[in-house]
Amino acid sequence: MIKLDKIPFDSSLEGKNKKVWVKFEGENYLFKCYSENLTSAYSEVFASYFFEKLNIPFFVKYDFAYLGDFFGTVSKSFFSKKILVKLKLKEIYDLIKIKNNKLIENDNILKHLYDDTFTGMYVQSVETTLILIKHYCELNKIKVDLINIDKQLSTMCMLDYFLGNYDRHSGNIEFYLYQNEKNEIYFEIEPIFDNGNFFALNNEFKEPLNLLEIKKFYSLKFGISKVGINNIYENNLYFKDNRLVIHDIIIKVKENLIDKAVFEKLIKLNINNEIKEFEKKYNVKFKKINKDVIINIYKYKTSQYKKYIGIIRGKQDVKI
């Protein structure tokens, strides 16, 4: 638990939670106030704890903190490069339209997007995102490693799906341009951040959810769509057709766009032990109701995948 001196919040920082940049032991940290929503603070730090256990290489680490009397989380600034500009998907899309709208009109996927597609909770698929980035970088002669971005986006989608995060909107995925020592400009994706809704912990359930109730909860909350992880954020719908999600995740793993070791470890964690270790490490206690929700969501999302380990290891063809 980190304790910081009280300073005014910065109203220019986006998001519903108050935020401010602070100095701690000579480093820059972002403090996010959760005094009115403790479960989201728990979710933020618990997700970070999970990513560390899974050896995810690209995520923002969060810790609990007090800023004066305000309770929240802190995350260390991850920018060490010379950042030129930060970009969101909507801005990338708009810049492409301005510079060469024919690229949008001639692309069977992009031409179906509208200006309001990226507002609010709307975030496009992994594949659509990669197409937008490719066009943007080619138009502006910017260097980019699309495979690396595909790996991070696909892994992020998988984690959000398994761990019940439904808040990966366009404000929670960001990109940036940076300049290297040779003055070359590169396009990069920011690490995974803003995880205050993992395991649906920002919902105050009145009673624990069993597996059937969780399935109903997710279907009602996110609607129904017969698409998989490649469209995991299309119109903010999560998916009732788990067979298609299984298929897409397995394809991503077999193509080495999702790390096999991470996938296998994720679906075989002892969730009860992880909760106990987390509570001990951070000296906190989940409400029993939240523990039950975490356990049931994890069991619901992972139970179907364990039988496909043979496929992941290349012993069988992908036939779902």
Image (tube, grey):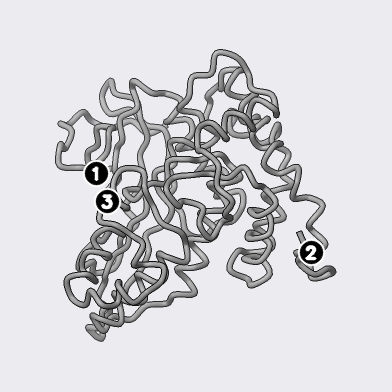
Does the CB distance between marks 2 and 3 fall below 8 Å? no
Real-space Cα distance between discs 3 and 1?
A: 37 Å
Q: Which is in the foreground here, disc 3 or disc 1?
A: 3
Residue type, numbered disc 1: Lys
Q: Which mark is residue 23?
A: 1
Residue type, numbered disc 3: Asp
In the foreground, 89 or 6 = 89
Residue 274 shown left or right of residue 63 in the figure: right
Real-space Cα distance between discs 2 and 3?
A: 39 Å
Categorize mark 1 by other alpha carbons within 10 Å: few (<14), some (14-19), many (20+).
few
Q: Which mark is residue 311?
A: 2
Does the CB distance between marks 3 and 1 fall below 8 Å? no
Q: Assign a secondary structure to mark 2.
A: helix
Q: Which residue is mark 3?
A: 116
> Residue 101's spot in the image, x, y percent?
23, 74
Going from the N terminus, do you reach mark 2 or mark 1 first? 1
In the image, residue 319 sits, relative to residue 1, either above or below, namely: below
Categorize mark 2 by other alpha carbons within 10 Å: few (<14), some (14-19), many (20+).
some
Residue type, numbered disc 2: Ile
Q: Residue at x 50, y 40 (%)?
A: 165
Going from the N terminus, do you reach mark 3 or mark 1 first? 1
In the image, residue 256 sits, relative to residue 277, either above or below, namely: below
In the foreground, 307 or 122 = 122
Q: Residue at x 45, y 27 (%)?
A: 202
